[in-house]
Each structure stands twice: as C-alpha cells, then as structure tokens.
Image (tube, grey):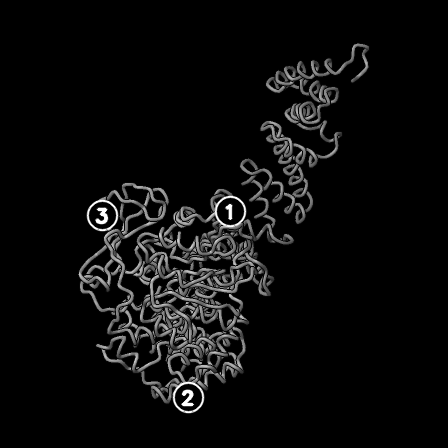
C-alpha cells in the first residue's frame, strides 16, 4: 500500500530472534479471511514488527485454501505522520518504488478501452501519474497516508485523502478499471471493500489486484526475500491462488482470472466474461517515454528528478541506448555535485564513508538513495561505449562501497533494497570477470572474497558462471595452483549433469586437463572427456579433444590389459568405451576392441556385436576368421534372447543380421528351434516354421529335440486350423 509504515525504528527483540523466525506455535481455531472456512490452523513462523515493538506475531495458515493470517495484528494507522516520513518518502521516490511492478498490471486490460482508473491505496500515485501521462486515462486515487498527500501535490493528482468506504465512494461516479497494487493484504477482512468495488464497476468495468503469494514463503530463502512478502506489522493476510479466487467470487465477481508468479499473485475480476490472454509485459517504449518526459518535467524538483533520471538512465543502459545514457549520466552528475558534492564522473574519488550510527534520516541528507544502481550502470556504460576497463572498475568498486556504506542504516530501519544488494553483488562479479584475462590471481582473490559474503539467489547464478570462467581459464592454461582450489566444488556440481550447456564446456574441459596433466589420473580425465564429448554440444575444440580422448582411452585400456588381462579390464571398461566407439577404429585399438567384445558377449551381446564389427575392420588372416565366427555366434545369441523374451521387434532386427537361410542351416540346433518359434509366432507362417522345427527335432541335443517336438504339435494345429473344409489354404 505504501512504504511509510515500515520506517519506525529498531526492535531489540527482532535483533535477537530475527524479523522472521521459523517457529511452530500451538494451533488455533480461526476463520480464514480468504475462504471463510473456520478451521484449526497451525503456524510455522512468527515475525517481529517495527510498528509494534517488543511483540511477535504468528502466521496461521488455512488447511483448506492455504492462505495465511496474523490474527493478533492490528493494521497500522496509515494517516498518522511519522518522524521518518521525509526520509522514507525520499527513499520511495528515488529507489523504493518499483515502476515495472506497479505499471505492468495496467497493461493487462486486453486492449479494452479504459477512460477512468480508480486506484485504492495508491500511495504516492506513480501508477495514476503513468496512466494519465502515457495511457491517457483519467486517474482517481484513494489513500489517507501522508505519502499520498505529498504525491497528490507533487504530481498534481486527484487523490482523496481517505479510505474507500460506503460514504467516500459516493465521490466516484464510475470507473472502468479499479486497481489495488499490494492492497488487499493490508486488510483483515476483504469482503466489504471487494463488495463495494464489485457494485461500482457494474457490468463493464474490471478490478485488478496484486498481492504477495504465500507459496513464496520458504525456509531456504533469504531473510530479505521474505521481508518484502511479509512486510512485518503491515501485511495482515497472505493469499494463496485459491484463497484470492474464493474471496473475489464471494464478493460477487462472476469471472476471476489469477496469474501466479513466484512472489506475487495478479487477479483480474469482472462481472462480464474476461478475454483470456497471456501476461502482458510493460511496454518498454512507453516506459522510456514516460521516464524521459518526467525527467525533463521535474528538472527543478531535486528528489523527483533523481528518481526519474536514475530510472531512465538504467533503462537506457539496459536497452543499449548508450549515447543518450551518457547525457543523462552527465545531468545526474551535475545535479548530485550541487546537492551532495558527489562527482559521478570520477567514481574512484567518491567519498562514501558514513558513520556507524547513520540512520535513514541522516543518509537522506547526504546521499541519493539510488546511488548504487546509477554507479553500477555507469560501469556497464563505460564497458560498452569506450571499453574503458579502468573507468568501469572504478564504477564497480564505487558501487560496492556505496552499498556497504548505506546498507546498515537501511537494515536497521527494516528497509530491504534488494536491487542495490543484487547490483553490488553483480559489481563484484564484474570485477572478477575483468581480472580473468590480465591477472588470473587477482580474479581468484576477488572470487574467494565474494564467496565469504552473503550473495542473493539471482547473484548465485552469476557467481557460479564466473567461478567456472576463472577455473576454466586456469586449468586450460596449466595454472594448476589457481585451478586446484576451485576444482572440487565445480566437479561436484557438474559430475551428475546430463544436459551439458555451452557455458559449462570450458570448465569440463578444464577438469579433464587437470586430471590428465596435473594429477596423471587417466580414469578421472576420461570420465570428464566422456561427459564432454558424448553429452555436450560441439565446439571448435571438439576435434582436438576427441583426438586426446581416444589417445588417452587407448593408453588407459592397454595399460590395464597388459597389467591384468581381460578380467582386470572388465570393471573399468566403462571408462574407455565412449572413446573407442567414436569415429573410425585405429590399428592399436584391435586388442582392446576384442577384449570389450568378450566382456560384453554374455551381458550385453548387442554391444559385443559392435565391438567385434569394429575389430574385424582392423584384423587380417586367421584373426579375422576367428572374429567373424565370434561375431556370428554373438548375433545368434542376440536373436535367441529376443525370441526367448518374446520381443518381436528385437527378434526382427536381430534375425535380419543373421545372414542367408543357407548359412543358417549350418547353425546350432538351438538356432533352428528359435527360427521355428519366431516364424510361427511373429511371422505366423506355420508351414515354414515346421521346416525349421523338424530340423531341430532331428538333432542330437535331447533338450532342443524335445522342445522342438512340443512346438511342432502347436504348429500342426495352427496349420490345420488354417485349412478350409475343401482343403484350400485360407
């Protein structure tokens, strides 16, 4: 709803036990505000609140709809002035207001015309302002907070400084769209407000609500991730998708659509059918236009200028509009030089030392709250325009200094600036990447320093990528001292990967080179080469790596054969199979191919066929004859197993490999029996089957002979059943 209620001071109880504590409490019988079921509800966490000091509040969850509530928590008095209101307002305008999150729901109207927008709990009014300036709608807001009063004055908006209720709604004739951004979670009982809105929009309008998603609560996530969801002391109800849907349906909305995001829910409700469509993102051209015009409009308003210009600068950098971004950075530099004595053009000389007792109020007078994102994007700009690495590093170092200087005071006030935390982490990662080529030792030093600090979930992905980059560069250039401390965690994470990504191939190559060239461990080296060349996409290095792979596999297998023979090779054969099955066989491979064929002959005859076929390509004279017989025997074995297992597809494939019928008549009696069975059951040719079965019944193998005679009885019965009464074959 607004930000002011979060900034009221420091709670020693919160410091001791944490703002959020995973802690079970005794179940209570409560009525769920979302689904209205009365149930015994359990609690798995409690929170401290900067608004209600020295107290903790349990979150009880409904077993029916999974929504949650803080039943003993009272809503803050939003219209009350707080001593930190100026600092909180400055933070909100410059950094805290998430424009994209607020504006994106306004694009979910499926192109239906909107003339009047009513926003309940509009806060400072940025959404109303965007709707008027960019979308051309008439905006009306309701919000009793001091933040809303300042927004109405600063942005020239029609915001009623009141709660929306049965009396105050009389001031609104109609609204095509009613919007509540992060609103409903602040209300203990949503029914009166939702029913009021239902009656207001009649049959043509719609309601859009956003609210935190209770399913995002997870003990494995960071405290910062939970603070914005729970907003301790401010959010009274946390909704599930089902709970939000039930609350809207109970209010009378005939049509409800809920979009589920990781941390939030977006509901669209109306009394007329909704045209379904995919989530619509913010129109970035319109957003950029808005930021540009408002930067110009509020050039004389210090705080609004910083907020709009800082966001426009980020948007320009992120969209690659670097020339314009440079001009905006110059404007910010001039503005902040005059107001704070900060020269953005010389980031290395920025003096950001703050005292240990700084508060959000004292920081507001000394620094812009969006300093961190501006510095970070200044570094990105320096890299992408002039490739000025030295200047980029200065910006990234300043980003980190600014974040460390400001974070303690913000944290003490329960202010969670996730963007600045994330960008400070990315700045450290950028510094590592910039050091990889010129100074790998420095890159490792920076990486190890970053790993000692808390890193956000999103930054963890970037950290993993840069760790692989540093390791790959070290291992693939023989800098074992740098590669060694990184090898184990990388190997542990990649060992069981099945779908290798392009970004991982250099690290896997490094693991192979480290094993082969530094540890002299062919077994481990072949494992990584197998993974790389069998499971990963091809790169320009693939031909050279394939050559190394085959050479190492041949050498490894030969060593084992020489030392211990075929039985010694059996448990280790998996390490060399991939390489020897790849490409054309080479003359030195002959003994290994034959050995692998023998190893697989009884356990995996299909693979044995492949090994013997590759070996025959290399063999000559008597060796070739012997291998030919081994190959024929193995093919027969595969066919026999397929017939015995009743696998018709495998039987058909393996029978096709057996050769001509003339050669099969020389085969063993068991083959004749199998041919008879296959012909009778799969091909359904009783006459032909009897020819093979009679041959098997006349052999000297009593077991085969008796089985063949039994099958002949069945074949003759089928032959008879296929005869018509006049003797013709049916």
Mark 3 — residue?
A: 25
Q: Which residue is mark 2?
A: 334
Q: Residues within 10 Å of mark 2 (few under 14, many from 20)?
A: some
- In three-dimensional space, the C-alpha distance between marks 1 and 3, rounded to whole angstroms, equals 57 Å
Quadrant location of the C terminus in the rendered image: top right
Point out residue 689 in the picture as x, y percentages from the top left corner. 71, 22
Q: Are marks 3 and 2 in contact (CB under 8 Å)?
A: no
Label 3 Cα neighbours within 10 Å, binned few <14 / some 14-19 / many ≥20:
some
Q: Which residue is tagged 1?
A: 573
Helix or strand or loop: what does disc 2 sit on?
helix
Q: Quadrant of the N terminus?
A: bottom left
- Point 77% across, 14% down: residue: 723
Residue 324 in sight here: yes
The image's mark for residue 70 is none
- In primary-sequence order, the first of circles 2 and 1 is 2
Where is 156 relative to 276, above or below?
below
The residue sitting at 49% across, 68% down in the picture is: 138
């Amino acid at each position: 709803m607004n930000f002011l209620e979060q900034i009221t001071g420091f709670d020693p109880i919160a410091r001791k036990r944490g703002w959020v504590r995973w802690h079970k409490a005794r179940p209570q019988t409560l009525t769920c505000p979302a689904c209205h079921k009365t149930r015994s509800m359990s609690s798995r966490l409690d929170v401290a609140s900067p608004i209600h000091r020295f107290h903790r509040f349990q979150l009880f969850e409904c077993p029916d709809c999974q929504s949650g509530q803080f039943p003993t928590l009272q809503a803050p008095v939003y219209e009350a002035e707080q001593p930190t209101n100026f600092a909180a307002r400055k933070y909100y305008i410059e950094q805290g207001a998430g424009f994209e999150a607020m504006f994106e729901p306004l694009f979910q109207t499926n192109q239906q015309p909107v003339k009047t927008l009513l926003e309940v709990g509009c806060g400072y009014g940025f959404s109303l302002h965007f709707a008027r300036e960019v979308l051309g709608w008439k905006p009306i807001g309701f919000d009793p907070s001091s933040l809303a009063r300042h927004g109405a004055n600063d942005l020239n908006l029609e915001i009623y400084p009141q709660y929306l209720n049965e009396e105050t709604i009389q001031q609104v004739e109609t609204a095509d769209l009613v919007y509540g951004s992060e609103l409903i979670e602040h209300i203990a009982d949503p029914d009166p407000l939702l029913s009021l809105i239902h009656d207001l929009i009649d049959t043509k309008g719609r309601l859009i609500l956003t609210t935190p998603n209770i399913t995002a609560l997870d003990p494995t996530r960071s405290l910062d991730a939970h603070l914005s969801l729970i907003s301790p002391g401010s959010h009274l109800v946390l909704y599930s998708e089902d709970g939000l849907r039930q609350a809207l349906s109970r209010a009378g909305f005939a049509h409800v659509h809920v979009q589920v995001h990781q941390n939030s829910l977006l509901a669209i409700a109306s009394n007329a059918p909704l045209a379904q469509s995919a989530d619509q993102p913010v129109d970035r051209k319109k957003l950029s236009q808005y930021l540009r015009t408002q930067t110009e409009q509020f050039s004389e308003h210090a705080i609004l200028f910083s907020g709009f210009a800082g966001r426009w600068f980020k948007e320009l950098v992120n969209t690659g509009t670097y020339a314009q971004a440079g001009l905006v950075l110059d404007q910010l530099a001039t503005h902040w030089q005059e107001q704070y004595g900060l020269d953005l053009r010389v980031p290395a000389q920025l003096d950001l030392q703050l005292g240990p007792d700084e508060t959000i109020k004292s920081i507001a007078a000394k620094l812009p709250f969006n300093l961190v994102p501006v510095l970070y994007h200044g570094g990105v700009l320096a890299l992408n325009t002039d490739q000025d690495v030295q200047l980029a590093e200065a910006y990234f170092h300043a980003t980190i200094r600014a974040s460390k200087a400001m974070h303690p005071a913000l944290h003490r006030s329960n202010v969670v600036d996730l963007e600045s935390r994330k960008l400070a982490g990315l700045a450290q990662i950028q510094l590592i990447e910039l050091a990889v080529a010129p100074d790998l030792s420095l890159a490792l030093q920076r990486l190890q320093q970053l790993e000692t600090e808390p890193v956000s979930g999103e930054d963890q992905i970037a950290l993993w990528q840069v760790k692989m980059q540093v390791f790959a560069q070290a291992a693939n250039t023989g800098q074992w001292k740098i590669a060694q401390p990184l090898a184990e965690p990388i190997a542990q994470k990649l060992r069981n990967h099945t779908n290798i990504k392009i970004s991982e191939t250099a690290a896997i190559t490094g693991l192979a080179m480290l094993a082969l060239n530094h540890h002299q461990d062919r077994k481990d080296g072949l494992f990584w080469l197998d993974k790389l060349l069998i499971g990963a996409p091809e790169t320009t290095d693939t031909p050279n790596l394939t050559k190394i792979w085959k050479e190492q596999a041949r050498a490894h297998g030969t060593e084992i054969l020489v030392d211990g023979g075929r039985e010694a090779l059996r448990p280790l054969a998996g390490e060399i199979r991939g390489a020897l099955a790849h490409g054309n066989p080479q003359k030195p491979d002959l003994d290994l191919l034959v050995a692998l064929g023998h190893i697989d002959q009884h356990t995996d005859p299909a693979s044995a066929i492949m090994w013997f076929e590759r070996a025959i390509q290399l063999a000559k004279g008597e060796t070739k004859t012997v291998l030919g017989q081994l190959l024929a025997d193995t093919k027969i074995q595969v066919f026999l197993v397929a017939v015995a297992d009743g696998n018709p597809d495998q039987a058909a494939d393996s029978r096709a490999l057996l050769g001509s019928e003339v050669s099969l008549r020389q085969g063993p009696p068991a083959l004749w029996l199998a041919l008879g069975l296959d012909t009778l059951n799969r091909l359904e040719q009783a006459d032909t089957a009897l020819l093979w079965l009679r041959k098997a019944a006349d052999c000297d193998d009593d077991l085969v002979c008796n089985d063949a005679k039994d099958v002949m009885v069945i074949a003759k019965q089928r032959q008879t059943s296929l005869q018509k009464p006049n003797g013709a074959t049916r």
